[in-house]
Structure formats: C-alpha cells, structure tokens
Image: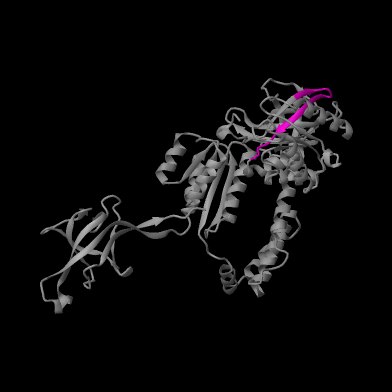
C-alpha cells in the first residue's frame, strides 16, 4: 500500500466501469484496530467483496465482516487473492477456504451454495475481469435499482476537519441526486453543500446513485456511518439535526440509568440515587416540575449515605487519555483500541478517555491532559501551532504521535503502563569476593564497637559506594553466603590501599565496610546493586 506502514489505514472509495455501468467500491482497512471502519463500510454497500488470502485463509477480521454482512442482509462475493504466490496450490486453497467459509454460514457455489468465489491476483490482474462479471451478475440477481432524480440520500464514509475548508465529509450517494447548494442533514449535523468533488479531486455540480463524493459545508463533524439526507431548506435541516441530537441525549441517559440498584447501595443511598436518575431523565424530557422534583429529593442524601456511595467505588490507578486523529473513522479505531488495551491488560489500571476529537493537537488539549495528569495519543496529526508543542514539553505532558496505527498502540502500551504502580528491582553493578576480614579500632570480641572491613577483590563489573556513577542512583550491598542473602544495606567506607575512594573497577583489590552489619566472613560474596524503577507495559 501507499499509506504509512504499508497498510490501509483509512476508507477510500473509487469508481470502476462495468457492463452494468459504474460500480462504486469502498476499500476498508484490514488491521484489527479498524473494526468500526469495516462495519460501517459493510453497512454502506449492497455487496460485500470478501477478500481472503489463499495462503492465510479465514482470519478474525474475515469472520467479523461475514457476521456484519449476514446481519445486514448484504450479499457476499469472495475474492481469493495471492493465487500466484509461490507454493500456493490453487485447487487446494479453493477447497480449504470454501470449507472454512461454510463453517461460518457462507456456502460457495463449489459446495452447492449461491456465493460466488473468484481467484484473483493483485499483481498480474488475473481473475479481476471474472470478479467484475460476478459483481454484475450479483447486482442483476438482486435487481438493484435507484431513482437518479429523487431527493438525494447517502451514507457518511468518513469525515475530517480541514484547516482551510472546515468540515469535510466523504459520502456515497445511495439514492437520488445530491447537488451543490442542497441543504443536508448528516446524523446530528446539518448545513449546505458549498462544494463537492469526486475521489480524483475534480469539482462536481451534482452526483447520482453509487457515486462517491467529498462535500464541504456541514456545521459540525458527522460520524462515520451516519445517514445523509437532503432537506428542503437549511432551517428544516437544522431542526431535524437538533431533534436527533436531543433524542440521542435522552437515549444515552436512559441507558446509563440503572435498572436496579447495586447491592452495596442500600436504604437512603439507593433510594436517593434512583430518584436523581429519574429526575435527570425527566428534566431532559421537559416534564413539568422536574427541577422541583430534583431539588426536593437531593437533600435527603445524608452524610452516611454519601460515605456508602464513596466506599462503593474502588480506587485504582487511572490513566487519563486525550485522543486526536485525522478523521472520524480513525478516531473511532484509536479510541476502541486504547479502551481494549485497558480492558484486556493484566496491569492493575483503569484507562479513561477524557477527550476524543478530530484535528491537530491544540493548547487546550495539552491543558486538559495536564489538568488530568494524563497523556495525549495523536494519530496522523501534528500540532495546531508551536505553542501546543512547547506547552506539552514545558508541562511534561506525554504526547505520542504516529501515522502508523500499530506503532502508536505500541507506544500507548508503554506510556499507559507508567501510570500503573511501578516495581523496584535490584540491578547488579558488580560483585566482590571476600578474601580476608580486618578489624579497625578494637578487638574481635568487641565487634560492635569497631569497624569491620572486608578485604575484597572485584571479580565483575564496577562498585560504587554511595551512588552509581552511571545512573546517580543509590547503591546497596547484598551479602551472599552459601547462596543465601544474609544482609542487604548501604555501604559505609570503600578503600583502595589506604585511600578512601568512591569507586573501584573489575580486578581492583579494596576494603569495604557496611553500615549496621559486622558479621562478614571470608568466602562471602558481596553484590553491589542499584534499585531501578521498572514501569509496567500494558
């Protein structure tokens, strides 16, 4: 592919001429992270071309697309690729993949079913004409028709914010005609078509059924998969969009309101929480006395009830994340992938997406992440200005940017892991062998009042007394006897000949005394270590 990382990372559309006329293709990413793009793409078409590699067979993404197509009632045509790859037996691959597809409810013609299967080569083009014929035949069987003169209807494939143009939406017209100047509704957004282009970038004045277009003029960013409709005027378009937005708010709140209270919320706490939820729903519905209803019952929450509510929440380390992406489809994919990292990891941490939006990283994004002591994950976008990048560096906000999704997710695993409790691990710097014991300032029977010095030789690495010269970290000494640790603590003095030194190297002979430990013996091994902070990785 020509995209970063050599993989498809965005939905693209194009037209191909056939006997039946022009066929519109949507190319969706195959990477596991782009599930929502594939689902929206499958919902937007009449026929799903299921691409299965002859050397790979049916994988998880293939199963996912099959399930989406079967649920949505879309027809399937199978394209078996890589037929000219060395070592591939075409007939064996046809049989194997047909059997794999059958186990998921897709019966190919070779097994007596109705699904057409076409072997193709992406390198030589072999089998592509047969694939086009199969699509034409499928369209004829389905009797696909559209009225080119009706009011336009379509579906949003993807959407983004262009610095010069504003909101830009990639749309496929499914019915009727869309013209420049039309008032449009796309999901909960509305506007007027100010400009329209084909995938090649040529300006268009109008577009009919099965035409991929890019339109400019929506006031806000629609979601990939939103239906787009032509309205009689902008006023009507705005009213429809506002009504949809209000309905969505009510639905979200109703879904969030619990059907029954959790077991740990009992008595007054449970009753009050239930009443608050009911009041919130009522307020959004505009029912009379809703505000009075809420005012009347919230004061019933006693201090004991508040304590019960607080104790019901489990405190866990939390990583707050601001997500930025170049378009809506990519944004959904990144958000879903980061949430999956938090849900699937064994690391004890909650991943909280505090903001997700399309566009470059701005100063407000950096401030939001800084206030939440969080981080920023940015896919295929830069900074809105020098100020945003400088602010991030000044405040120490971790900002991961990449134009390759798997690279960004690998960085996210490391960055998010730093919000989990870190582990302290001893790292060995060097080892000394104790050859002889010396006592300074008293007799052997009075060891408690003398300095006991171990005459040693450095047999590996380097030894520092207080701080490692390389890392600056405090050093500790582990006394090992017969393979067991008998003491771990700080060093007191380190001598080379008669001089007090801070550092000795492999091969040096030295004298070492330890703080709070005098029971050193000939034959002991002393390991010099530093405590390093080891962060977890999701």
Position above or below: 334 against 501: above
How is this picture coloured? one colour
Q: Nearer the viewer, residue 471 or 62?
A: 62
Residue 47 on the magenta span? no
Q: Quadrant of residue 125?
A: top right
Q: Quadrant of residue 438?
A: bottom left
Q: Quadrant of the N terminus?
A: top right
Which residue ends up furthest to the bottom in the rendered image?
445
Q: Is residue 454 left or right of residue 6?
A: left
Q: Which residues are magenta?
A: 16-30
Q: Decide whether the magenta segment is chiefly helix, strand or loop.
A: strand
Residue 113, horizontal then vertical, whole percent:
85, 41
Residue that appears at 83% across and 22% down: 19
Q: Quadrant of residue 516?
A: bottom left
Q: Nearer the viewer, residue 515 or 521?
A: 521
Residue 482, horizontal then vertical, whole percent:
31, 70
Position above or below: 59 against 454: above
Residue 462, horizontal then vertical, whole percent:
25, 53
Residue that appears at 75% across and 45% down: 100
Residue that appears at 40% across and 43% down: 394
Q: Nearer the viewer, residue 498 or 112?
A: 112
Position above or below: 422 against 210: below
Residue 495, horizontal then vertical, whole percent:
15, 59
Residue that appears at 72% across and 62% down: 278
Res 410 seen here: yes
């Amino acid at each position: 592919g020509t995209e970063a990382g050599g993989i498809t990372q965005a939905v693209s559309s194009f037209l191909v001429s056939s006997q039946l006329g022009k066929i519109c293709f949507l190319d969706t990413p195959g990477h596991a992270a782009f599930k929502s793009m594939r689902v929206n793409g499958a919902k937007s078409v009449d026929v799903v071309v299921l691409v299965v590699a002859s050397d790979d067979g049916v994988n998880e993404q293939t199963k996912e697309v099959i399930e989406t197509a079967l649920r949505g009632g879309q027809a399937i045509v199978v394209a078996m690729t890589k037929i000219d790859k060395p070592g591939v037996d075409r007939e064996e691959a046809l049989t194997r993949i047909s059997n794999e597809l059958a186990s998921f409810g897709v019966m190919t013609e070779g097994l007596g079913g109705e699904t057409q299967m076409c072997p193709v080569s992406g390198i030589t083009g072999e089998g592509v004409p047969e694939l086009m014929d199969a699509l034409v035949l499928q369209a004829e069987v389905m009797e696909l028709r559209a009225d080119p003169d009706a009011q336009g209807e379509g579906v949003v494939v993807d959407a983004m914010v262009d610095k010069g143009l504003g909101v830009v939406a990639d749309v496929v017209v499914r019915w009727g005609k869309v013209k420049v100047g039309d008032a449009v509704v796309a999901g909960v957004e509305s506007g007027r078509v100010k400009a329209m282009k084909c995938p090649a970038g040529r300006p268009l004045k109008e577009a009919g059924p099965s035409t991929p277009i890019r339109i400019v003029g929506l006031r806000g960013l629609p979601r990939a998969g939103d239906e787009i409709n032509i309205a009689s005027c902008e006023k009507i378009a705005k009213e429809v969009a506002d009504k949809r937005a209000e309905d969505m708010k009510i639905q979200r709140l109703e879904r969030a309101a619990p059907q029954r209270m959790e077991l740990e919320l009992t008595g007054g706490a449970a009753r009050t929480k239930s009443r608050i939820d009911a009041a919130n729903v009522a307020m959004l519905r505009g029912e009379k006395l809703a505000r009075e209803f809420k005012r009347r019952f919230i004061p019933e929450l006693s201090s004991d009830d508040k304590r019960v509510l607080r104790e019901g929440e489990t405190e866990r380390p939390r990583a707050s994340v601001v997500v930025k992406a170049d378009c809506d489809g990519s944004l959904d994919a990144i958000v879903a992938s980061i949430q999956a990292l938090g849900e699937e990891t064994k690391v004890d941490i909650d991943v909280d997406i505090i903001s997700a939006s399309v566009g470059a990283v701005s100063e407000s994004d950096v401030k939001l992440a800084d206030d939440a002591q969080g981080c920023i994950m940015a896919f295929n976008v830069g900074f809105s200005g020098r100020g945003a990048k400088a602010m991030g560096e000044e405040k120490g906000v971790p900002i991961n940017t990449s134009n390759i999704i798997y690279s960004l997710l690998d960085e996210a695993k490391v960055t998010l892991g730093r919000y989990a409790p870190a582990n302290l691990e001893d790292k060995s710097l060097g080892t000394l062998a104790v050859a002889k014991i010396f006592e300074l300032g008293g007799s052997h029977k009075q060891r408690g009042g003398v300095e006991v010095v171990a005459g040693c030789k450095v047999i590996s690495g380097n030894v520092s007394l207080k701080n490692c010269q390389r890392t600056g970290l405090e050093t500790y000494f582990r006394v090992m006897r017969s393979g067991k640790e008998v003491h771990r603590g700080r060093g007191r003095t380190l001598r080379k000949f008669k001089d007090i030194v801070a550092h000795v190297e492999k091969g040096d002979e030295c004298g070492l005394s330890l703080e709070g430990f005098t029971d050193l013996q000939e034959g002991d091994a002393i390991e010099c270590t530093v405590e390093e902070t080891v962060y977890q990785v999701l």
